[in-house]
Amino acid sequence: MTDTTQTPAAPALPDRLSTDPRSPHHVAAVFERDIGIHFNGKELTNVEEYCISEGWVKVPAGKTRDRKGNPLLIKLKGKVEAFYK
């Protein structure tokens, strides 16, 4: 017997992606696999949102929170590469 169960192909990573489910840039299908972000040659693990074409990532600014309890984000500009781990 042949095994017909194959792992589905991962969807292509979008140009802009957010981890916040309320964002219009959130794609739930992408988060079924682990995603890595290289920013200026270093791998970051705390990226909340990225845009490859504009060259920026948003990361939390320490432990500070806004009045709704969401982390305050700062935008860092540089070379961004997204990949599946």
Image: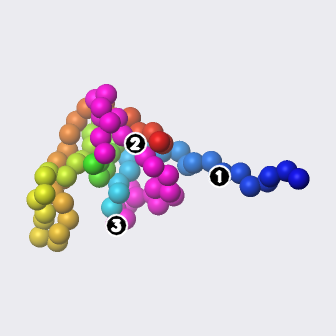
Residue 83 in sight from this viewpoint: yes
Q: Comparing marks 1 and 3, which lies closer to the viewer?
A: 1
Say which residue label 3 marks: 22
Q: Residue 59 at x, y = what percent?
A: 22, 48
Asked if the magenta segment contains residue 46, the reply would be no
Q: Residue 85 at x, y = what percent?
A: 47, 42
Say which residue label 1 marks: 8
Query: Which disc number belongs to residue 36?
Result: 2
Which element type, helix, strand or loop, lies under badge 1? loop
Mark 1 and mark 2: Cα distance apart in space? 19 Å
Which residue occupies the extreme bottom position in the image? 68
At a point 33% along the width and 61% down the height, the residue shown is 20
At a point 19% along the width and 52% down the height, the residue shown is 60
Residue contact between numbered discs 2 and 3, judged by CB atoms under 8 Å: no
Q: Residue 80 at x, y = what percent?
A: 33, 35
Amino acid type, callout 2: Gly
Residue contact between numbered discs 1 and 3, judged by CB atoms under 8 Å: no
Amino acid type, callout 1: Pro
Mark 2 and mark 3: Cα distance apart in space? 21 Å
Q: Comparing marks 2 and 3, which lies closer to the viewer?
A: 2
Q: Is 55 in front, or is 71? A: 71
Left or right, residue 68 beside residue 26 = left
Q: Residues within 10 Å of mark 3 (few under 14, many from 20)?
A: few
Left or right, residue 32 beside residue 48 = right
Which element type, helix, strand or loop, lies under badge 3? loop
Q: Earlier in the sequence, mark 1 or mark 3?
A: 1
